[in-house]
Each structure stands twice: as structure tokens, then as C-alpha cells.
Amino acid sequence: MRKPLIAGNWKMFKTYDEVLSYAGDIIQRISDVKDVEILICPPYVYIHPLIEALKDSAVKTGSQNVFWEDSGAFTGEVSAPMIASIGTEYSIVGHSERRQLFGETDETVGRRVHAAFRGSLTPIVCVGETLAEREAGTTFDVVESQVRKGLAGLDADQGASLVIAYEPVWAIGTGKTATPEMAQEVHGFIRKILSDLFGREVSEQIRILYGGSVKGDNIDALMAQSDIDGALVGGASLDPASFERIIRFKR
Ligand code: PGA
């Protein structure tokens, strides 16, 4: 059984005071939730204070990116051993905003994924097609290439622990969500590729999250799909009440 993972991606939002007040609020709201893994990925500067503020709760923290080298003269970068050393377990890798705005490629995604594993972080590897690619009928080709290149060279043990996030680019921050059936179609397809890469048994253990305008009013139908194992939530994770509603999806 795959434990559902609900992950918040705060992107470049919130001040320090807002982070602390959010932490106090969310702890109260979800203290009884046991069967869902909850993760918040804030900007780097807030990871440590957030860990401190959440220490009496089951809420985990992750980073929004990770550099591909472990240390060295790389001004402005943050490495996996650094992130892991403060008590963080996860790192988002290859988010579409990184791909579109910061020159991320499948090759650099792959390097970051390996760096995450070397540093004992679990990568959440993001894939997804643009609107033009969907309209051109190339969704499956694009997603397959992103998955195969992003995961190249991983062994089955690493495969078993990684997380994939399918986020159609046209659904991110736009209010447009893929229908649950559209999302399931791609999730099922990704699981077949994972089976091809790591074997069927391992592919059944890998969590595949859906992302792109996930909200309280669409999470239940998304989570009802057999290959959707959680969500990567941007905008709706910024408010504790709406994030709580997503965490408490109806089964
Ligand atoms: P959104 O963002 O929920 O605001 O669409 C999702 C994401 O970018 O991970």
C-alpha cells in the first residue's frame, strides 16, 4: 500500500512572521491525521525555522530545488548534504518553473536526482507537458522522455523510494485542472514506464503525485483514481484552512 503524500510547494511566498504563524495554525488543524504524509517545501531560508516550529508535529519539510554538486565554489547554490543535515527528507526536482524560467533540462534534472540520493534526500521529480505539447498530441512522448532521462542510471532501491509528480504545465496556477480521468491516464502510463525501468514490484511502491490547481473541491475525485497517490499543491497550500481540506481528502 502506498501511503498518500500531500506536499505543499510554497514557491517564493511568505515572510518569516507568516511562516511561524502558519506553522502554529497547521499543527493544530492536522494533529489527528495519521494516514497521510504531510510535507511543506518553503523557500530555503525558512526550512530550518519551519522544522523548529513543526517539531512537535508529523509535518515534514522539503526544499524546492537542490544543486547537483555536493560542495564547492558554486556561489548561491545549496547542496543535498546541506539540506539533509538540517533534518529535511525531500527535495522537489525539475519543477516546470525551473525548467521554463531557469534553464533546467532533463539532463540537469537527472544530475540533481542523483545528487539528492547521494545526500540522503528523496527527490520529488516533476514532469508534465505544456499546452502546446498537449494540443500537438505529444503528451505521452514528452512525459516518457522526461521520466526516462530524469531517472537515468538509478538502481531499483533508489527507484523504490523516489516520488514522481505529474504536473501538466497548463494546469499550474491557472485554475485549470486535468480531469481525474486525464490525470489517471498519464499516471497509469508513468507507472508502466517505472515498471519497465525498475520492475513491476518496485513500480507499485512508487508514489505518483498530481499537481496543477489542486484545491479542496477537486482533491477527492483526483485521489479516487488508482494511480494518484497524493498531490503537489502550490497556491492552495499557502492558506492553512485550504491545505487542511486537501490533506483531509475524502476516501
Ligand atoms: P498550483 O501549483 O497548485 O498553484 O497550480 C502547483 C505547483 O506548481 O506545484
Image (cartoon, rainbow, N blue to C red):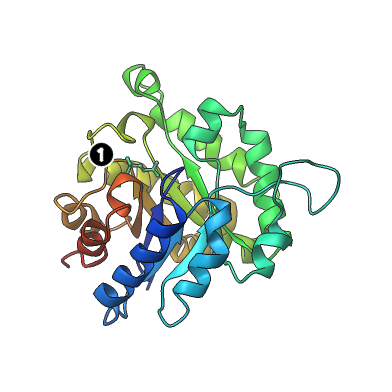
Ligand 1 position by quadrant: top left
- Left/right of residue 38 with respect to residue 214 in the rendered view: right
Instruction: For mark 1, give the secondary structure.
Output: helix
Residue 138, percent across and down?
41, 23
The structure residue drawn at horizontal position 63% and vertical position 40%, both measured from the top left corner, is: 109
From the viewer's perspective, is residue 127 above or below residue 61?
above
The structure residue drawn at horizontal position 53% and vertical position 26%, both measured from the top left corner, is: 101
Residue 33, percent across and down?
28, 78
Query: Which image quadrant: the N terminus?
Result: bottom left
Q: Nearer the viewer, residue 21 or 222?
A: 21
Residue 58, percent across and down?
41, 78
Q: Is mark 1 within 8 Å of ligand 1?
A: no
Q: Mark yes or no: residue 177 visible.
A: yes
| Amino acid under disc 1 | Met
Q: Residue furthest right?
A: 73
Q: Nearer the viewer, residue 201 or 127?
A: 127
Q: Residue beneath label 1, please?
A: 182
From the viewer's perspective, is residue 237 above or below residue 167?
below
